Amino acid sequence: MADKETVIGVETRISGEIRGEEDLVVKGRVDGKIHLSHALTVEKGAIVQADVDVRNLVISGTLVGNIVASESVRLLATARVVGDLAAPRVIMDAGAAYRGRVDMGDIEAARAAVASRSAAQPVASSASSAKDRPAPPRVAPTPKIAAFAAKVAPRFVAPVASEKSAETAPAAPPAFPRVAGTAGSVAPAWAKKKIRRR
Amino acid sequence: MAKEKETKPMANTVIGSSIVIDGEISGEEPITILGTVKGKVAVAQGVVIEAGATVEADIEGQTVTVSGKVTGNVTAREKLELRPESKMVGNAKAPRIVVADGATFKGNVDMDV
């Protein structure tokens, strides 16, 4: 068995706090807190009800709690997640279910970090050209889609159009409103699906 | 299924050497601890506390094998084994108890006689 990996098996339950400096794979159940300087993997079928503070997080199972990841969070298709999420990189696969607030922090700084990490890779050129562009590195939504997305998931759209990009984005579509104060749950999964169908 | 129960069981749960758990571990499958656990460990199968591990907890399991350091009461339904380099402080309760030469132990022993 690998020495540098901790596994919480399918039929094991831990309630309390887990801390450590190695990778942790949860296949069973953890209630409490998880604080790691390495990666946490929540496997399919696992249930984690905990505040999580890790470097990288990959979720295929169920996680309820607030998430802070210093590097990245990836929600795979079978993931079911409820809680606020703070990480510079957030990846959600189609099919993932998530409810909560996403905070990617300072988008510029995060992108610089990503660019420096992928500098050796062929995407480097696109990353450096992205620097001149203040808007987030997403495909600019058409007014129609933006309006739809704002309607479906106002809180999800708002941060994208916020701060720097709002002041400096040259081609910010007019129909990209910050629907502040509109109560509504974040529903990126269905928002994505519907947009794709068009 | 190999019968190398001593140090490498087919543990489904492994608590690595740099991990610290403060709380309760329960489950239906074998567990190997190389790190630090404080609180309680109660599993239906074998518990192995490897050399280098520190457990400050009450332990309950089918078989309990200690090579590391345990502070707490240990209840094994089948067998408790204290291996040569182990250190244990606490009460031991098990129908069969093996204390190897070199093991350090302080506490009461209850073999249910």
Image (spheres, coloured by chain):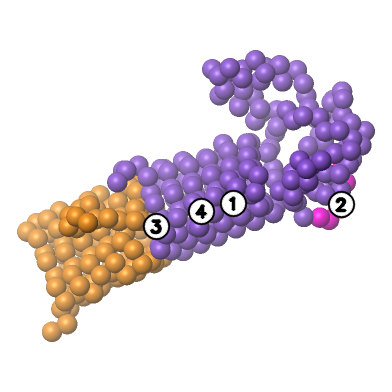
> Which residue is tagged 3?
A9
The amino acid type of the residue labelled 3 equals Gly
Counting residues from the start of the chain, the first of labels 3 and 4 encountered is 3
Mark 2 secondary-structure assignment: loop
Percent position of residue B100, x then y = 9, 60
Q: Does the segment drawn in magenta span residue A92?
A: no
* Residue at image location 45% in from the left, 53% down from the top: A26
> Which residue is tagged 4?
A44
Tell me the number on the disc at residue A79: 1
Residues in magenta, as a range: A178-184
Q: Colour of chain A?
A: purple
Q: Chain of mark 1?
A: A
The amino acid type of the residue labelled 4 equals Lys
Say if mark 4 contacts mark 2, CB within 8 Å. no
Q: Colour of chain B?
A: orange
* Residue at image location 32% in from the left, 43% down from the top: A2
- Which quadrant of the structure image shows residue A76? top right
> Which residue is tagged 2?
A181
The amino acid type of the residue labelled 1 equals Ala
Q: Residue furthest front?
A: A197
Quick check: do tags 1 and 3 share a chain? yes
